[in-house]
Amino acid sequence: MSEKDFVNKMVQLMDTEEEIDMDTNLLNLPEWDSLSLVGFLAMCRANDRYVEPRNVKAAQTVRDLYVMFTGVK
Amino acid sequence: MLGVVSGIKLSHVASIVSKNRMSIEERCAHLLTPKQAARLARGTGFKRLSIAPSEVCTSDLCYRAATELFDRGLVKREEIGALLFISEYPDYPVPATAFILQGRLGLPHDIIALDINLGCPGFAYGIYLASMLLSNMERKVMMCFGGTSSRDRWKDDTSMLPLFGDGGAVAIVEKTEGGGVNAFYNIDSYGERYDALITRRGGSRANKITDLEGNLIETERSNYEVMDGMAIMDFSLKEAPDNIEKLIEYAGITKADIDISLFHQANRMIVEALADKLKIEREKAPFKCEDIGNTTSASIPICMTELKSRGEFGSFKTALISGYGVGLAVSSAVLDLSETNVLETLQYE
C-alpha cells in the first residue's frame, strides 16, 4: 500500500476532518482515541498483520502506524 | 476443546428487547458533543441502544420470550426437562435465577435448573451444555440468555456506555428423530486474562461501595464493569479466529460451505474485521444489532430474530456461530439451522 493510500485510509478510519500526513503527530489529533486505536488494531488483524496492542498505543506518528501495517520501514 | 454431538437440533428461538431505544447522542450527552457522538456511532455501528426500565431484570425479559413460545403452542411446559439461565445478570446473588424462572413459568418440578455465569460466549456454550444434558433425557432443554447490562455502566465510561444494550432470548434444544446430522463445537478458556473484562465489586471478594443507607455510590468507578478495549479486540481477532479455523477443519467443511456466520454482536467493527480475517464474505456474517446494542449472551439469538424480522432468515443448513469475550473465552459451533423456528424480535413495553 502506498503512503498516500495509507494516509487516506487513516483519515477514513479516524473519521477526522484534520489534514494529516505521514509525519502528523498522533498525540495532537483528538480523533486518535480509543475508538481509533481499536479500529487500527482491527484493520491490521483483518489484513493478517499481527501487531501488539502496546505497540499501537506507543505509536507517535502516522508513519509509525504505516510501518506496523505494512512492515515497510 | 473440540467435540461433536449428533441427533440434536436448535428447534426454537425467541428474543426480546426494550421498546425504549436511546440514541448514542442522548446516552452520552454529558460526555460528548453531538458531532463526537455521531462519529462514535459510525465507528461502532450502534446508532441506538435498547434500554430496559430500571425495575426490569434479565429474567423478566426471558420470561416474556419463553411465555411467547408457550402461548403460541410451539413448546409445552411439560416437555421441558431442564432450564439453563446463561447470563451474568441474576435476579439475586442467591438463589439461582433458573429456579425463579422455573417457578414463574410454571414448569414441572422434576426438572434441572441451573445458572451459568457467561456473557458474550454464552450461546454456543449453552447449546453444547444442553446437548450434553439431552444425552440422558427424553425431554427438551430451555436456555435463557441475555443481560440488563446497560445499568452496569459507569456514567463517564465512553468505551462501554455507547455499546451495551438490554435484551433477553430463549432457545429450545431437543433431540431429532432418527439421529440427524452432527453439530461440532470448539470451546476455549483463557482464565489468565480474566481481568480484561471485569466487575470488581459485588461478589464475595469485594462488596459494592454504598452510602450508609445502602445506595450504590454512582461516582465510584470500581462499582462498575471495566473493559480493556484493546485486549478484547486483540482477543476477538486472534484467539476467536484461531478457534473458528480449528472448528471448520474439524467439521470437515470449507468456508464456502458455510451458509451464514452468526458472530457475537459486540460491535460492527469486530464483526466485520472477524469476517475479513476469516475470509468470509461480510454479507454472510451479518451485523443486525445497530438499534439494540451489545446484549452479551443474547446477541446471537437476537441477531437471528432480527434477520427473521427483516425477512432475511433463510434455510441455513450449515451455520457457524461464535461468541467471544468475558472469561476470556471463545465458544463456537457449526450446526444445522435449517429446521430452526425463529420468531421475529419481540418488544418489551
Image (spheres, rainbow, N blue to C red):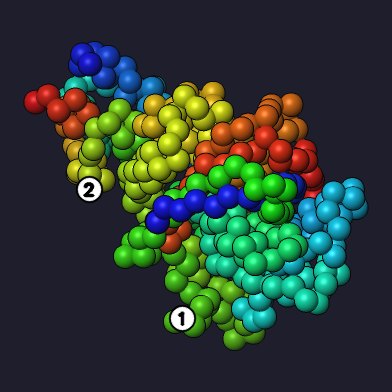
Quarter of the figure with the N terminus of chain B: bottom left
B21 vs B195: above or below: above
Residue at x-position 73% and y-position 33%: B308
Q: Which mark is residue B262?
A: none
The picture places residue B168, in percent across and down from the top left corner, at 69, 54
Residue B266 visible to an observer of this rendering: no
Mark 2 touches mark 1? (CB < 8 Å):
no
Where does the image place residue B166, in percent across and percent down from the top left? 66, 52
Label annotation for residue B206: 1
Q: Is residue A62 above or below residue B13?
A: above
Q: Quadrant of residue A18?
A: top left
Q: Which residue is mark 2?
A: A54
Q: In the displayed structure, does residue B121 sit left or right of residue A70?
A: right
In this rendering, would B167 be left or right of A24? right
- The residues tagged by marks 2 and 1 sit, at their Cα atoms, a distance apart of 30 Å
Instruction: Find numbered disc 2 in the image and state the secondary structure of the residue it sits on.
Output: helix
Viewer-closest of B242 and B193: B242
Judging depth in this view, the residue of A14 and A56 nearest the camera is A56
Residue drawn at point x = 64 percent, y = 38 percent: B337
Q: Residue at x 50, y 27 (%)?
A: B257
Rendered residue at 50%/51% (across/down): B4
Callout 1: helix, strand or loop? loop
Q: Position of residue A7 (x, y in %)?
A: 27, 19
Q: Is residue B327 visible?
A: yes
- Residues indicated by labels 2 and 1 sit on the same polypeptide chain: no
Label 1 packing within 10 angstroms: few (<14), some (14-19), many (20+) = few
B210, above or below B241, in the image: below
